[in-house]
Amino acid sequence: MLQLLPAIDLLDGKCVRLRQGNYNDSTVFSDDPVDMALRWRDEGAERLHLVDLDGAKAGRPVNQNVVRRIAEATGLPCQLGGGIRNEDNIRLTIEEAGVDRVIVGTKALREPDWFAQMCAKFPHRLALGLDARDSMVATDGWLEVSQVSVTQLAQRFVGVPLAAVIYTNIANDGMMQGIDQQTLDDFVRLAEMGLPVIASGGVTTMDDIAALKKINAEQPNLIGAIIGRAIYEGTIRVRETIEFLRS
């Protein structure tokens, strides 16, 4: 079954959503991310997707205390990304912040051999954060777009003990415009490589959910979907969506 992962993006200790990764275009949805996490758990979520936006910008983890409180309060497995760029940060995030998956993006692009080594050292605990615009990888908290394609980078990690590949189209993210066909095609291509793929960016309506569910039925390596602004603005309801995915 395709797993639904509610997103909680942390900025200045608050739960926010950005549009297209733009720090100057943010909306605060809650001053207490822990309460928000408990709401999604109570509506049936079985895993949470957490993003340390301050960390992504600073290049180091910043909101570890809030993350630990969320993990402890909900009892849910959590995955966290944002500014995690060395082995000490990985170990700290797993051991002290209490998450079960650590997402690495920028450092994996710049040093793919290092990331493969870390995956071997922390098998099935690391997720590759593939953030893209027009199928080209974006880095540094989405502030820079590289000349490396999504499939080029992903190919480096076929056969590596990854927890997941989290692919976000930042052109769609937070825009409430749905998932475009190019992005759906990218999900399929990554899944066909044998990589466990989690879709992110642009999931807006139940039509988007249905499209992802259809892909999952044909290609079970598409294992999850992260939903952010849509659940905060009410165009997708967590409980109803999970029931739909289970049906």
Image (spheres, grey):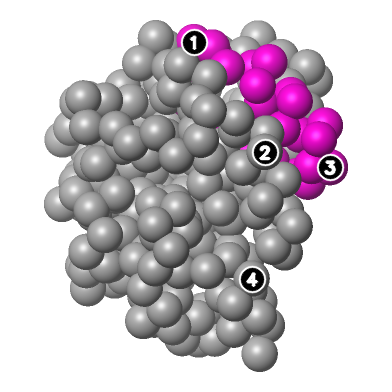
Q: Which mark is residue 60?
A: 1
The local secondary structure at tag 2 comes to helix
Q: Earlier in the sequence, mark 2 or mark 4?
A: 2
Q: Nearer the viewer, mark 4 or mark 3?
A: 4
Residue at horizontal 28 percent and vertical 67 percent from the top? 179
- Please identify the quadrant where the C terminus is shown: bottom right
Q: CA distance from mark 2 to mark 1?
A: 25 Å
Task: Please name which of the two marks, 3 or 1, marks the residue nearer to the observer.
Answer: 3
Q: Is 199 in front, or is 29?
A: 29
Say if 84 sits above or below 40 in the image. above
Comparing marks 2 and 1, which lies closer to the viewer? 2
Residue 162 in view (yes/no): no
Which residue is at 53% across, 19% downward? 13
Please state the horizontal and vertical placement of residue 204, each as a whole percent of the image: 34, 66
Residue 173: image location, x then y, percent: 29, 49
Q: Position of residue 95 (x, y in %)?
A: 80, 20
Badge 4 or badge 3: first in the primary sequence: 3
Q: Amino acid at mark 2?
A: Asp
On the image, which quarter does residue 201 sit in? bottom left
Whether the residues at callouts 2 and 3 have beta carbons within 8 Å, the answer is no
Of residue 87 and residue 231, the one placed in the foreground of this image is: 231
The residue indicated by pointer 4 is: 239
Q: What's the distance in space between the residues labelled 3 and 1, CA to CA?
A: 25 Å
Residue range of the region highlighted in magenta in the rendering: 60-84
Q: Residues within 10 Å of mark 2 (few under 14, many from 20)?
A: some
